[in-house]
């Protein structure tokens, strides 16, 4: 029995309707001052520099762009005139237009790997969009989705998992963080292993979060060593963390 041709057409439609990618590329500047985020620089490989401050992850699905900053979520629609329009919290009412004479390096080098990362981030979005990562972080429970997505190789999910595990293994982190160093806690081996996995997945922020963990435990030399590793690989978060600590010291002197 032959399969009716309309079945193939229908399957093709659904495949195209859910096309996921992360090759969006270019410098986009806000037309008016409706948001805090004046510019986005998409690198053509799943990373976006947000307002010149820090990098986030992104993927596209049809005419939508989903951007993950640190602990939030931005959603945009790609317009016919190539501008992008914000439709979610934080970017709502904003419109960004491409600036053609601005140079943004296209970092796409491995198509297969890039597509895999886009698919993983899209799956992560579908499985976690009903609840923010901050809600999960402070819930006191480890969301199994983060472990599953980390196991699949999504470094962003491993980062969230690190935060949840750090709260679990570091009592009083939210209530009395300044007293933790005096408790002389030993670094938990699971957190060290998780940070190494994040780095192995190509994300230098594995060094950053481990450095922050060491600093909380009072292991300042180890903290600086991890932050320096991250900084060498281009981490802005590590530079900021180290800078804030040094600024605090200068105020005390």
Image (spheres, grey):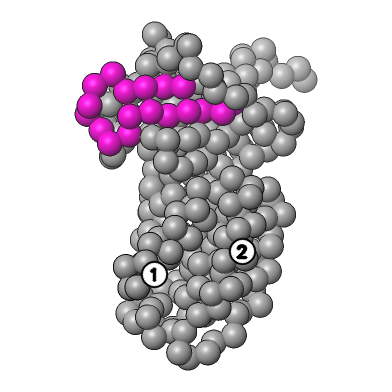
Quadrant of residue 244 within the rendered picture: bottom left
Seen in the image, is 61 located left or right of residue 105? left
| Residue 180 occupies quadrant | bottom left
Measure the alpha-carbon separation of dots 2 and 1. 19 Å
- Residue contact between numbered discs 2 and 1, judged by CB atoms under 8 Å: no
Q: Where does residue 7 sit, x and y in percent of width and height?
A: 63, 19
Q: Is residue 32 magenta?
A: yes
Label drawn at residue 226: 2
Which secondary structure, mark 1? helix
Q: On screen, 228 above or below 99?
A: below
Residue 189 belongs to the span the image colors magenta: no
| Magenta residue span | 27-44
Mark 2 lies on a secondary structure that is helix
Left or right: residue 173 versus residue 94 is: right
| Circle 2 or circle 1, nearest the eye | 1
Q: Which residue sits furthest bottom? A: 183
Outermost residue to the top: 81
Closer to the chain start, of discs 2 and 1, is 2
Instruction: Decide if residue 14 is in sight here.
Output: no
> Is 21 situated left or right of 215 in this image?
right
Can residue 164 be seen in this snapshot? yes
Mark 2 packing: few (<14 Cα in 10 Å), some, or many (20+)?
Answer: many
Q: Residue at x 41, y 22 (%)?
A: 28
């Amino acid at each position: 029995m032959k399969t009716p041709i309309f079945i193939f057409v229908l399957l093709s439609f659904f495949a195209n309707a859910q096309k996921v990618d992360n090759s969006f590329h270019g410098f986009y500047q806000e037309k008016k001052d409706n948001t805090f985020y004046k510019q986005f620089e998409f690198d053509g490989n799943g990373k976006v520099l947000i307002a010149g401050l820090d990098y986030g992850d992104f993927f596209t699905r049809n005419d939508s762009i989903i951007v993950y900053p640190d602990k939030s979520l931005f959603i945009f629609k790609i317009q016919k005139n190539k501008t992008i329009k914000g439709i979610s919290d934080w970017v709502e009412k904003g419109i960004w237009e491409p600036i053609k004479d601005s140079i943004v390096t296209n970092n796409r080098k491995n198509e297969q790997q890039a597509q895999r990362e886009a698919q993983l981030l899209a799956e992560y979005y579908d499985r976690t969009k009903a609840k923010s990562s901050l809600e999960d972080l402070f819930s006191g429970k480890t969301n199994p989705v983060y472990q599953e997505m980390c196991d699949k190789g999504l470094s962003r999910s491993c980062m969230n998992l690190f935060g949840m595990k750090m709260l679990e293994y570091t009592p009083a982190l939210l209530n009395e963080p300044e007293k933790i160093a005096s408790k002389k806690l030993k670094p938990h081996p699971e957190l060290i292993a998780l940070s190494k996995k994040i780095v192995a997945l190509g994300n230098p922020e594995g060094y950053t979060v481990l450095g922050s963990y060491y600093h909380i435990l009072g292991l300042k030399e180890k903290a600086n060593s991890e932050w320096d590793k991250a900084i060498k690989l281009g981490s802005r978060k590590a530079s900021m963390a180290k800078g804030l600590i040094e600024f605090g010291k200068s105020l005390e002197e």
